[in-house]
Image (tube, grey):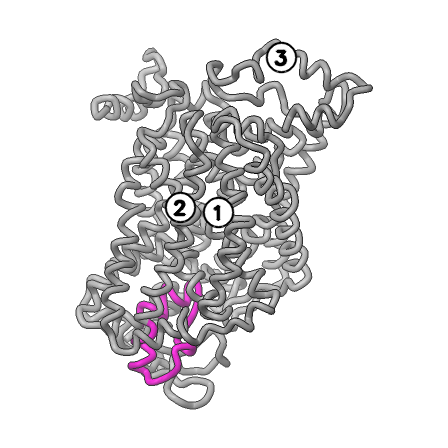
Amino acid sequence: MREYGWNTFKDFIFRNPAVVDQDPPVDDGDENTERGNWASKKEYILSTIGYAVGLGNIWRFPYLAYKNGGGAFLIPYFVMLVVTGIPLFFLESAFGQFCSQGPINIWRAVPILQGVGIAMVIVTLIVSVYYNVIIAYSLYYMFASFQSPLPWSSCLSWADGNCSSVPTGKDGNSSCPSSNMITVPVQSPSEQYWNRVALQRSSGLDETGPVVWHLALCLLLSSMLVAAALSKGIKSSGKVVYFTATFPYVVILILLIRGATLEGARDGIEFYIGSQSNLTKLTEAQVWKDAATQTFYSLSIGWGGVMTLASYNNFHNNVFKDSFVVTLTNAGTSVLAGFAIFSILGHMAHIYKMPVGEVVKEGFGLAFIAYPDALSKLPISPLWSILFFFMLLTVGLDSQFAGIEVVTTCLLDAFPKVFKPKRTLLTLTTCSVLYFLGLPCVTRVSLPLFNFMFCVCVCILLMFPGGNRFIKDIEMMLGNKSFTFWLWWRACWFFLSPCIIVVILVWSLMTFTPPSYEAVQFPDWGLALGWCMAVFVLLWIPVVAVYKLMRAEGSVWKSLCAPAKEWHPYLDIHRGERYSEERCRNRMTSWTKPDVNVNVISSSWL
């Protein structure tokens, strides 16, 4: 394999047109010798866990739990996990594994909806820009942590007159700034470092300013790391995830053990999930909405990554069991990370002699302001800071691997003759494009624009309700199951999950407020640009549907609901009688008959 890798590298760099093209590397034991398979079940599980366990587990879930009743929030969270998270994750995984194709070709199952696959890929591109910039932020802070004391531990030469190691709160007492507090002129050193040094933040979208070069270089390094890890697709990334998917758990446990030994740690955990849990919060609809949204966001449902990773499985892999392993591990990681985060925030509140609630933040405020501030108060603070930001780096890389794989897989599946011999070059080109797309996010306008792109991605994600009619296809992979077995999954796929998603979508649109970041308001042109991004993504769905209808031959029903003749297991050996060529011809012919019974079609597909 090493010799092959070197020869492939030489072919790309010193390519001789007379040399015969070679396919991308596959192992001798691969079931699918054209696309390749995971080298082992472990690599698939670790890659999928790495994709699902993202930054939302670390910087969003703990805050949502604290905000929505502490331990009481676990009730709606796990209800939503069981009713929507696990069923939709199982659905997407089975979809990808059955036909061994990327998100676009997968929709051959319902050709009229193939535009959904294109929209998924575009969403993934936007999210990949998002994650690439986060990795760049993490790299910068990790490099900055190799100093003692930490540069944000006190007000240094970069600070202005509003910087204070003991910020003033809304009540006039010593406190740290919080997202729920009235804006005050005094800021902590970590907050000023984030705004004035790391981001060099401007006042709004109208003042873009120059590129922040230290972030641009970190962004370049991030793109290079991803390109190197994906140079051979899953064959190389599958080896990298042995470290990147497991190391975050080591750091979380280290931070948890260290945090538990600090004064005030108990107060932080009490606020997170202890005796201060508020069961009355369960009567508030917003709590259930937050639980459902966190489930979708955390598991990355609807972005195409789950389908793509599963498409490299062996056909008879037990995707049902894998779905439980990944989703439950993801949920457990969220809960565990909350303990590590809040134990140290409790210590920070103890030092500032104020309630824990006034140091709690979410998102960037937690990862790059509150938590670094808390770490700077610990002995040997550079060590803890390096570990924390290295953890953020590995978590971001895992998610980025799957995002890039979605794009490259779709291109490989669509144009195999063109791209298969040039997979490394394709990966390098994709990472380069993402780098240049990420440069506007490392100008001085970066964070407001960055947050808005994320808001758009979440809105788009909610517009992709799951649903399928291929239970018989799943049984071809897993074996026949009883009617009782499928009863629950039918209820979730065809009723519970779609209803919950529709309710959340309508509610989100009704309660939509223009995004902002702290005191920075987005101008009208910025909001219009954001809506144009959303429309551009969603426009592919009706455009492709109209195109399919215009090219349809025979019955319109065939174009709307019948799977295309290309919808089948990738390998002939797995198609059996159900997808034999003769039966497919008969099935396609029967669908063109004007007097065909709709119920018969539905039952044959189910």
Label 1 vs 2, first from the N-terminus: 1
- Left or right of 135: which side holds 410? right
- Judge whether residue 366 is colored magenta: yes
Mark toward the start of the polypeptide (1 vs 3): 1
SS category of the residue bearing label 1? loop
User: Is residue 334 visible to the viewer in this orientation of the structure?
Assistant: yes
Determine the residue positioned at 43% across, 24% down: 419
* Percent of width and height locating residue 142: 27, 58
| Highlighted range, magenta | 345-373
What label does residue 583 carry, if any?
A: 3
Q: Are marks 1 and 3 in contact (CB under 8 Å)?
A: no
Disc 2 marks which residue?
399
Q: How busy is the neighbourhood of tag 2: few (under 14 within 10 Å), some, or many (20 plus)?
A: many
Q: Is residue 267 left or right of residue 589?
A: left
Q: Nearer the viewer, residue 444 or 178?
A: 178
Alpha carbon distance from label 2 to label 3: 41 Å
Mark 2 or mark 3, which has the lower sequence index? 2
